[in-house]
Image: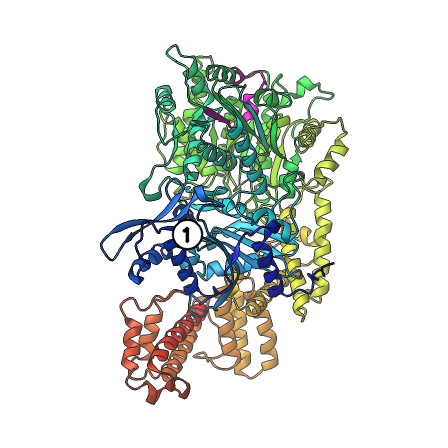
Amino acid sequence: MKNQVNTTTQSELQFEQEVIDHLTKIGGVKQWEYAKGIKTTEQLWDNFKRILEQNNQARLDKPLSVTEFNQIKKIISNIDSPYSAGQFLYGVNGVSEIEVDLDDNQHVFLTVFDQAQVGGGNTVYQVVNQIERPKVIDGKQNRRFDITLLINGLPIVQIELKTSLHSSIEALNQMEQYIAEKQFSGIFSTLQVLVAMTPHDIRYMANTTRDKFNRAFAFNWQDEETAKPVRKWKEFVEKVLSIPMAHDLATRYMVLDGTKNKESIKVMRPYQVYATKRVLDKVRKFDFKYGEGKLGYIWHTTGSGKTITSFKTAWLASRLPNVDKVVFLVDRIALTNQTADAYRAYDPIAGFEGKTGVVSDTANISDLHRKLTKKSDKNIIVTSIQKMSRYVTRESFSQLTDNILFIVDEAHRSTGDGTKNEGMLESIRKALPNSAWVGYTGTPRFPETREIFGDLIHAYTIKEAIADKNVLGFKVEFKETIEPPTDPTEEDIDDNLRGSVYDYSPEHVDLVVEDIFKNWKERSNNRKYNALFTVHVGGNRASTPRAMEYFDKFMEENNKRPIEDRLKVAISFSIDTSNSVHQLKTNENLHRAIRAYNALFDTAFDMTSVKSYTEDLARRLNKTADDGNYLDLVIVVDQLLTGFDAPELNTLYIDRTLKGGNLIQAYSRTNRIHDRNAKPQGNIVNYRWPIQNEYEMNQSFAIYSNRDSAAEQLSLDELIIGNQKSGILSKSFGTIEEETKDVIQQLAELTEGFNQLPPSEKAQEVVFEGLKEYNRLLNQLKQFTEDDEKNPISAYDEPEAFYERLGITKEQEVRLTTVLANELRENRAIAEEIDISQVHLEMTHIHDVTINYDYLIELIAQLANEVHVDNMNKAKKTKDEIDIEVAKSENDQEITKVRNFVAKVLAKEFEFDKYPVALSVEEMNQAMERSQRDSNIKQLTEFIRKWGLDNSVKPKELDKLIQRHQYGQEDLDKQGELTTIMNDARSDYKEISSEEIASLTWVKYRKKFHEAFYKMADEIKKSE
């Protein structure tokens, strides 16, 4: 029996070699070729050049010259983002080419990639390791990458490894550091997928820019049948990094998101890949001339990325030989633009080298006819069910012969629930017999969805999505306002059937608006997130008058409040064209709401531009408006409750009854992933029928978290327990409170009562993790508005009560979350040789912690006076108080500046003009700046003497040059400023510089001077 490696004692290099060995023979078949001899960037370029020449022998008579290959190196090195890299690798119609001017004046296109040759043809798959990467930014380290997977010689997948004693998050942190240091540049600019691997935890994510790096988008792979995460590294390698799967993941299952100002690449998650594969397999085998065309439906819970999955399905299916057109059907005209925009953003051809892409929407029925009948490369059409139905039922319609795949979005609303859309869908199907149908829904109707589309193709429920951390769970409140009638019937409660006391009560409106204003800070996480409010009345009455009643009440309350406490509120509903008795009033209300909106945002919408108004409103709620001026709250009847995706919306207010799929859809507007600390769950606040609506909610979640949809008749308590266990509903306030107290107690023991960090590195790591857990739990607690006994609570309004409940004083929390947290960050930055800004530990506080600048200046003056009279014992105690106060700043630069100044005062290296010192904030800042200037001049003088620049430049001239410097940039030789200083020193640096520098040759002098100068410039900038 082969000896098993003990993964707990295995070194990283041993683990690395084992991974490489497995990559070369996955499943006993030759896979990646190990290019053992490639260890440097130059060797990587040479390898790429050889493969490029080999694959383009028909276009090249001889190997590329240095000049010719430099053109190629420049094109690849100029790729400035993973999104641009994705476009380059995809090329046009799946063929990536590079244009080269040969030395003999020939003009050729050389193929880099051909998607048709994934896993075969002349595609070359190699694995390399320990690639040496010299630093890109001066002052940073040289790096050595663990494992890189090359396709046709270009780096596509980067794998960073950690042993069992570490976590995959550390490997992710390492790759974030590489991104910050611009290491994924040059030949590495083509990287598409990042893999963080330990023996028992593997995560993968799309390559990204530093500002968009988010660990929440690093996923585990999953087993296809059970949806359980793949934990063993060998299984991950076999399922994900085998050929052709690894190539597919970086191309076929990678989405280029070209959303304006948010360009990025998104790698599909396992369930998205599995669903897409299954649909494509069904389409590939389907004979469009026979059969009903009911291929089936995809059930992926809301918020899990159905748009990406359906787009990739449409895109890949449109390239199958038996598919002529793909039509993406949405069931509301209002969603057509949104979907077409999303599809166009995901189209890898659109925008690349001036191409317009293959996705088109339809302006009208004639346009739809033209696009369905005309041969064109724009073979993905986005249109509405209504438009398609009108097209096939008009008299001039003649049957189409093309094979058309229909993908139906939000398919739950197109199934047998008695709506007119059901009839439309049937009429389209009958008119187009050469068609196949696939439905996508987060909330299928049972059994109607199956009857309309066929069997379930793939399921991914809300329970699975929450367990995978792909969507959030919910914190739900059921608020009492007015007293409801006793013993209501089901009809009384269901506002689709009957009106109720809630619909008519002005007191109910007042109490709802009062509750929203009163608890806005808690629910919005101190205005970080915004909200949606849905209003509906019963008895088949129009709901817009009630919605306007709320709008007017919000306006009235805003006028009573100071500007900083007001809410930016808007309302959205459709223009009324029904010619009913309500039409005039409804449209007058809408016009009034638009005028208020124009006044709020300086826009100019009117009744002729309602569609544009609605789109602008959605952008402001989604926080994508170009001017950065966003809404706090939008009131709707039914709009935006499905298909609206807003990661920075975290609360839904509900004055209506919801159940089943409609409830799941509405709630799921709030559960998109954003910042897991600040947005730990979606907040839901219900304002009617609390007992009955709580039961409806729990039953709905029980149904839609169960693949078998076994809607057992359970009690409310049984449903709640099941939903909390699944993570769908958040834990109670009391449970989270107890968990927080346990963490605080552990931190108190580790830090000797919040006074000092433990000495061992291992114990400090426990404190670091404890602080992150403290943040996570406290963020949840601060968003509650009442405890389990329904007593009102608020960390904002009554922080002292919060401190008491959690068993920590304000002073202890300040020391823990400022002084100790900052010390911990500094220690970690030193240990890992990184800048402190790279250590992510942004603390949450029970109550806002802010510096009292008057008190800080008073303390510094007191310290200076104590030093002046040589009372050093008192001065050291005063310094400790200064450390506590300045640690409250969230600005690392400010903390460093004050600490450096205080250290100089304490060391008697800085003296004030007169004593005793009693300065204003402004005068103390001037003293700090003078101290820093003096320190800079001293440092610059020492630098000049060390490097023999006495006859080249003066300290003040060098200081003036450095004032233009930006930290981390090599930006001070654009007009040859540094070169001039060096050249002026060339003749005499050996005579007047330090012994160490005088021994350098001129070539080495230039190199070392350049590095030392930027290192010094960064130090000066960091301390300012």
When the figure is inspected, residue 362 is found, relative to residue 225, above or below; the finding is above
Is residue 79 something that shows in the picture? Answer: no
When the figure is inspected, residue 694 is found, relative to residue 822, above or below; the finding is above
Percent x, y of residue 869: 54, 83
Q: Is residue 525 magenta?
A: no
Percent x, y of residue 936: 40, 76
When the figure is inspected, residue 860 is found, relative to residue 260, above or below; the finding is below
Give the left or right position of residue 877, taking residue 207 as reference: right
Q: Tell me which amino acid carries mark 1.
A: Ser
Percent x, y of residue 563: 47, 43
- Element on which disc 1 rests: loop
The residue depicted at 36 percent of the width and 27 percent of the height is: 609
Specify start and end residues of the magenta stretch as a single range.
404-423
Q: Nearer the viewer, residue 171 or 673?
A: 171
Percent x, y of residue 586: 46, 20
**What residue sits right under mark 1 in the picture?**
81
Q: Is residue 414 magenta?
A: yes
Is residue 97 something that shows in the picture? Answer: yes
**Badge 1 local density, few (<14 within 10 Å), some, or many (20+)?**
some
In which quadrant is the C terminus drawn?
A: bottom left
